[in-house]
Image (cartoon, grey):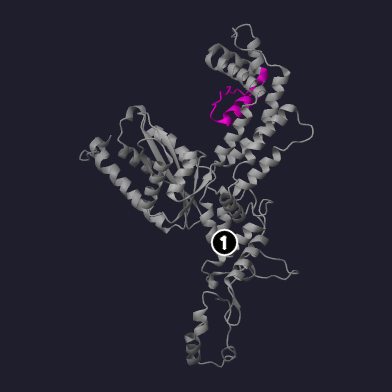
Amino acid sequence: MIKAMEPRYQPPNRQKLSEQLIPALFENEKAKLFQELQSTQAVSLTTDAWTSRSAESYLTITCHFVNKDWEMCFRILQTEKFHGSHTGERVGYELKTCMTSWGIQNKVNVMTVDNASNMTVALEVAGAQKLGCLAHTLNLASNKAMSIQSLQRVLAKVRSIVTYFHKSNIATEMLKEKQLALQLPQHKLINDCKTRWNSTYQMIQRFLTQRPAVLAALLDERIKRSKTISGMTAQEVQICEDFVSVMEVMLTATLVLCEEKTPTSGLILPLLRKLLHHFERKEGDSDFILTLKNAVGQNLATRYTDNNVRMFLEESSALDPRTKGKPCIQAEPWERLEDKLSLMDFNVNSVKTETDARPVTPVDIPQINHSPLPALPNIPAHLESGNSTDDDLDDEISKPNEQKVARTALESLFGEDEVLVTGEEFITPAELARKEVESYKGHKPASMKENPLKWWKENEVYFPKLASLARTYFCVQATPVASERVFSTTGDIVSATRACLSPERVNELVFWKKNMKF
C-alpha cells in the first residue's frame, strides 16, 4: 500500500528504529519530563522490582506530583537492570542516584513502598521518609484471617471444587446448563492466588453465588465426580457467608486505594479508624466471627504507629477537604499546620477571604446566580458635575490607582516579623496563618465523591498557603500500585519473542510507552 501511494518513500528498517528513532524519542521525552519536574513543587517516589522472562532483575522507579493545574501526574523515571541481591543499601543507592540525576533530591520527602525490611534501610540511605503501602498492610492483616484452622479447611474444599470444574470440560458444560435452568448468571468459578487475599474473597463470594448450580452439576449422573471432592456441611457454608460479610469492608478499602488520579494519603487514617471500629467485638457475633475479628483487628492496630508517619498522615488528612472533619483529626495537626504556614513567605495581596471575593446580598433580596460585576470606579465630584475639561480628565487618568506606602527603617528591620495588611494595621505571620487555618476549618467539607484536587483548584484563592502546602502532601499516594501496574507493560515489551532486549532498550521502551502522550 505504501509503495502504491508513494513509491519513493522508504520506511525505516529495524536497525534505524532501534539505533536512531527510539533513542531520539526517549531523549526528547526525557528532556520534557526533566523540565516538568523542575517546575513542580514536590515529588513522591514509588519503586518495585520485577524479573524478566530472561531471569534478569529490574528496578522500576516511578514518581507522582501535582502540576500547576491541580492534576495528579504519574511518570516513569527509570527501569534499570539491578545487579546482585536486593539489599537495603543497594536499593537506597539506586534511589539516591535516580533523584540526583533528575534534580529532585530536595523535592522528595516521602516515598510509598511495601513493608519489606530492606525498604526501611533503603529509604534511610536515600534520605526520605517511608510510608508503608496500605494495600500491602491490608493484605498482611487479611492473611492472618486465612490462618484460622476452620477457615483453612473450608478453603481447601472450595479450592478442590473450583479446580475440578476448571479441569473438566464436561463439568463446565453441566455447570452452564444448571446456571441457565436456575436463572443464575453464567459466570465461571474463580480460583484464588494465595499471595492476594482479595482473590480468595472473590473465590468464596462467587462460589456462594453459584452454589445451587454447583450442587446440581455435581449430583448429575452424567459426570463422574472426583473422589477428592467432598460435600460441605451447613456449618462450613455459614463460615463462608460470615467470612464474606465481615471481610467485605477490607475489599472495598483495597479498591479505593487503587485510584491514581486522586490523592489517597489523606484517606489512610480515616480508613484505618473505620476498619478498627468494624473489627471490634459486637453482641451476637459467632465464635468464628470473633476469632476472625480478633486476628485481623490486632494486626491492624500495630500499623502506622511511628510518630513521624502518624504526624504526616494526620496533616495529610487535615488538608484533604473530604476528611478534614473526621474524628481522627484532633487539635495537634492544625497547630502544626499553623506553625508551617507561619514560616512561609506571605504575600498579603494574594490572600483573599470568601467575604472579599463574593458579593454580599441582603437576605430579603433573592440571590441570582450570576457572576458579580466589577465595581465601578469612584468619579470625582468636579467630573461628575459635568464641569470638566480634557486637562482634568488627563490628570485623573495619570493618577495611580493606589499610592505606594513607603517602607520605614523600622519596617525594613522588622519586615520578617510583621506583615503589612493595611496602611494602619499590622499582623504577625502566625496570626495570619491562624486565620487562614480557621477559615479553612470552618469551610464546608467536600463530599467523599468529590475530587480534592478539583476542590483546591477552585478554593486556592481563599487559602493560598494551605493550597501550596497541600501540593506537597497530595503527591504522596497510599499505595505503590502505579509501579506494580508497570509490570503488565513490561510483560508486553519483554515478551517471549523479545526476551533478548538489552537493558538499555528496555528502559527506553518502558519510559517511552508510559510517559509519551499521544
Which stretch is magenta? Answer: 183-212
Q: Is residue 270 left or right of residue 262?
A: right
Q: Residues within 10 Å of mark 1 (few under 14, many from 20)?
A: many
Q: Answer above or below: position of 434 versus 272.
A: below
Q: Which x, y percent locates residue 234?
A: 73, 18
The quadrant the C terminus occupies is top left
Name the residue located 32 percent from the left edge and 37 percent from the top edge: 503
Q: Nearer the viewer, residue 318 or 83?
A: 83
Which image quadrant is residue 92 in? Answer: top left
The image shows residue 130, relative to residue 472, as above or below, that is above
Q: Quadrant of residue 236?
A: top right
Above/below status of 62 relative to 350: above
Q: What secondary structure is found at the residue carrying circle 1?
A: helix
Please check the rendered image and state whether residue 192 is part of the magenta-colored stretch, yes or no. Answer: yes
Q: What residue do we see at 55% from left, 30% from top?
A: 196
Give the quarter of the image for residue 237.
top right
| Disc 1 residue type (three-letter) | Leu
257 sits to left or right of 509? right
Q: Quadrant of the N terminus?
A: top left
Q: Indicate whether 446 appears above or below 412.
A: above
The stretch drawn in magenta includes residue 220: no
Task: Answer yes or no: is residue 74 visible.
Answer: no
Q: Nearer the viewer, residue 488 or 61?
A: 61
Measuring from the top left, give residue 208's x and y in whole percent: 66, 23
Image position, residue 35 (x, y; %): 37, 56
Left or right position of 227 against 235 = left
Q: Does the image show residue 452?
A: yes
x%, y% of residue 492? 39, 33
Residue under label 1: 466
332 vs 355, nearest the viewer: 332
Q: Residue furthest left?
A: 8
